[in-house]
Image (cartoon, rainbow, N blue to C red):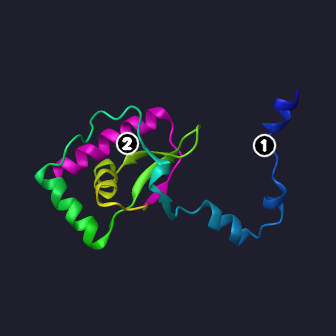
Amino acid sequence: MAGNVKNMGLTSLDDLFKSEEERQQDSRERILNIPIEELHPYARQPYSVERPTPDLVRLMDSIEQVGVAEPLIVRPRTEGGYEILSGHRRDYCARVVGLQTLPVIVREYTDDEADILVVDYSIQRYEA
């Protein structure tokens, strides 16, 4: 019975006392800087970055000089941290050059949506 009460969808006390502007701000997408140890590869990722290729070395040089210019797209993991849906190469390069945090956009996706997005992001990268 207690489990059912938790899932009733009641508004929290904090949310009851927020202004409409604060509620709208909470719903807006934001770029966050997340500690790199909280970022994990997407479990169903169809490819992996195993060794530095010439284009990855160029990306590492860029990240080392100016940082990560485009945020990664991630989703929350049930066990904590975030799964990377877009940005595996940037994550790899940032780790190699020793960055401690990465800019990310956190979005909620189902497994099916995530699968489609991972493939779509990969196709877009190869078409560029």
Q: Is residue 49 above or below residue 72?
A: above
In this rendering, position of residue 79 left or right of residue 88:
right
Residues in magenta, as a range: 102-128
Q: At x 30% / y 47%, what residue is drawn? A: 121
Q: Residue pushed farthest top? A: 1
- Quarter occupied by residue 51: top left
Disc on the earlier residue, 2 or 1: 1
Any magenta on residue 103?
Answer: yes
The kind of secondary structure element at disc 1 is loop
Q: Real-space Cα distance between discs 2 and 1? A: 29 Å
Mark 2 and mark 1 residues within 8 Å of each other at the beta carbon: no
Q: Residues within 10 Å of mark 2 (few under 14, many from 20)?
A: some
Residue at horizontal 37 percent and vertical 42 percent from the top: 117
Q: Position of residue 103 (x, y in %)?
A: 43, 62
What percent of the width, then of the height, locates residue 111?
47, 33
Which residue lies at the image location 78% right of the left edge and 43% below the top edge? 9
Indicate left or right for 22 with 78 as reference.
right
* Magenta stretch, overall SS: helix
Q: Which mark is residue 117?
A: 2
Q: Amino acid at mark 2?
A: Leu
On the rendered image, what quadrant is the N terminus found in? top right
Q: Badge 1: few (under 14), some or many (20 or more) residues near its Cα, within 10 Å?
A: few
What is the quadrant of residue 115 in the picture? top left
The location of residue 14, given as percent across then percent down, is 80, 60
Residue position for label 1: 9
In the displayed image of the protein, which residue is found farthest to the right? 1
Residue 128 visible in the current orientation: no
Indicate yes or no whether the magenta region holds residue 9.
no
| Depth check, front residue: 11 or 106 | 106
